[in-house]
Image (cartoon, rainbow, N blue to C red):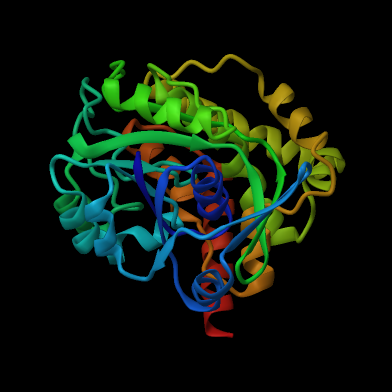
Amino acid sequence: MKFAVVGAGATGGFLGGFLARAGHDVTLVARGAHLEAMRRDGLRVRTADGEFTVRPRCTDDVGAVAGAEVAFLAVKAHAVAAMAGPLGAAVGSDGTLVTLQNGIPWWYFERLGGPLDGTRLESVDPGGVIAGHVDPLSIVGAVTYPATRIVEPGVVEHVEGTRFSIGELDGGRSERCRAISGALVESGLKCPVRTDIRKDLWLKLIGNAVFNPLSALTRASLTAIATEPGTRELALAMMREAVRVAEAVGVELDLTVEQRLDGAARVGEHKTSMLQDVESGRPLEIDALVGAVVEIGRLVGLELPRLETVYACVKLLDGTLRKA
């Protein structure tokens, strides 16, 4: 198959590297020193089983997506709006766009049915810019689980996890999802096709909506947050609020917040992606992870005092860091 990866950083580079190694036609869209290193030396992927190098096409032109059967969108959520125009034009109405962003995506209420069907969330799509350019019929939802990082330009290191869950927004079992899943499995990855991708999204989100902002504010690891009595109780309370929001939009989760918290504690001294962004001086991925949960809560009439407080604090932190 012909694939494109828009945002071939840590997660996108890892995915694109495995697809290219398996012989698929891959184009990586990246920028800066990372792009130049991949153009010059190829993309190196380090795993527990060893290291390999691939040499796919590398460009900074989002328009390159037009030549692919499937495009994976792997940029941070807050970066999507700026590229929505050229991205939507390149994917078109016949292409497939697999979204790999953490948190609540801009398409959450598209093709959902029910009273909130078609609702646009201002927190993740201000002014409707993304929805105005990207055809919802082109979208396949996804939830990513690999932990990866760029250790130097052109070099991606895989820490753990190989699963990318995917699913149609309306819950159908499509031929395109089966084809994407088959290609990823053939490449050495896991790719279950879900009939309710939003449930998978919430299972990951109830942790991300809590641990990411708390780690950014405290500079603490998952283990520290989950075991220190004060932050443990705060994290549990925030998770319970997030679960109430999920339930209000029809998502029933299969695990308790205590199980979710203890699972995070077992990860060890891991730094969340938001804490890594704080330390690197990058913009924080706040609205998709926390702001959208708060916005949905308001839509359904819920009070979320802890999530709203932490959201306000981490928004202030982001603004302060950008001025520094």
Total of numbered circles in the picture?
0
Instruction: Name above or below for residue 29 compared with residue 32.
Output: above
**Looking at the image, which residue is at 28% across and 61% down?**
64
Depth check: give the residue in front, 27 or 73: 27
Is residue 230 left or right of 158 when viewed as pictured? right
The answer to which of 43 and 119 lies nearer the viewer is 43
Quadrant location, the N terminus: top left
Residue 317 horizontal/vertical position (percent): 59, 69
Please tell me in which quadrant of the rendered image residue 99 appears.
Answer: top left
Q: Position of residue 154 (x, y in %)?
A: 60, 67
Horizontally, residue 38 falls left or right of residue 225, namely left
Name the residue: 73% across, 31% down: 261
| Residue 190 placement: quadrant | top right
Q: Is residue 128 visible?
A: no
Q: Is residue 56 above or below residue 290?
A: below
Horizontal side of 291 relative to 228 (left or right) equals left
| Front position in the image: 172 or 199 | 172
Residue at the bottom extreme? 324
Residue that appears at 73% across and 22% down: 259
Can you see residue 176?
A: yes
Q: Position of residue 25 (x, y in %)?
A: 39, 48
Q: Position of residue 75 (x, y in %)?
A: 44, 57
111 or 23, which is in the foreground? Answer: 23
Q: Quadrant of the C terminus?
A: bottom right
Residue closest to the far front:
23
